[in-house]
Structure formats: structure tokens, C-alpha cells
Amino acid sequence: MNKKKQDQKKLQEQFEVFWTWVFIIVIFVVVGWIGSTIFGGIFGFAKGLFSSEAKDFCSTAYEVTSAKTDYAAKQAFKTCVKNY
């Protein structure tokens, strides 16, 4: 009888260790997926914000070319790129 209880206890401990590792792996996968989704959106936004296409378009935009001072042109350019 005592041997049977020891075997059950050992089996229970192995079962707990197995599910602990499964839980840890699932948590890492979920956190990684959430992180990649968030950072992917941020990097996608930043890429669009500083894309060459936006710079090409905004460098010839009327608001930028008709600005009277360098500061006004710079601000108009930044606004144009941000809204592109």
C-alpha cells in the first residue's frame, strides 16, 4: 500500500511540473503575440510617418513651398508628413 501511495504522489508531482511548464510556455506565447502586435503597429506607423514617399510629396506641397520663412516651411512640412 505504501509503495502505491508513493507512486501516486510521484505521478502527481510530475503532473504538476508538466502543467506548470505548459502554462509558462503559453504565457510566453501570448505575451510575445501581444508584444509583436503592439510593436508592429507602432513601427508601421513610424515607417509611414517617415516614409520617402511622404517626404517627396510634402516637399512640393503648396503649404511648404509658399511659406514665407524657413521656420514656417519646416512646420508646414512636418504637419504635411504627419498627416500623409
Image (cartoon, grey):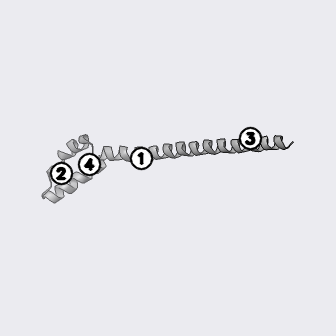
Cα–Cα span, label 4 and label 3: 63 Å
Amino acid on which the number 2 mark rests in the picture: Val
- Mark 4, secondary structure of its residue: helix
Q: Which residue is mark 3?
A: 11
Residue 64: numbered disc = 2
User: Residue 57 appears in which quarter of the rendering?
Assistant: top left
Q: Amino acid at mark 1?
A: Phe
Mark 4 or mark 2, which is nearer to you?
4
How many residues crowd mark 4 within 10 Å: few (<14), some (14–19), many (20+)? many
Q: Earlier in the sequence, mark 1 or mark 3?
A: 3
Front tag of 2 and 1: 1
Q: Nearer the viewer, residue 36 or 73?
A: 36
Of the image marks 4 and 2, the number of the one nearer the N terminus: 2
Of the numbered discs in the image, which one, if any, rests on residue 7?
Answer: none
**Crowding near pointer 2: few (<14 within 10 Å), some, many (20+)?**
many
Mark 1 element type: helix
Question: Which residue is label 4 attached to?
Answer: 81
Q: Are marks 3 and 2 in contact (CB under 8 Å)?
A: no
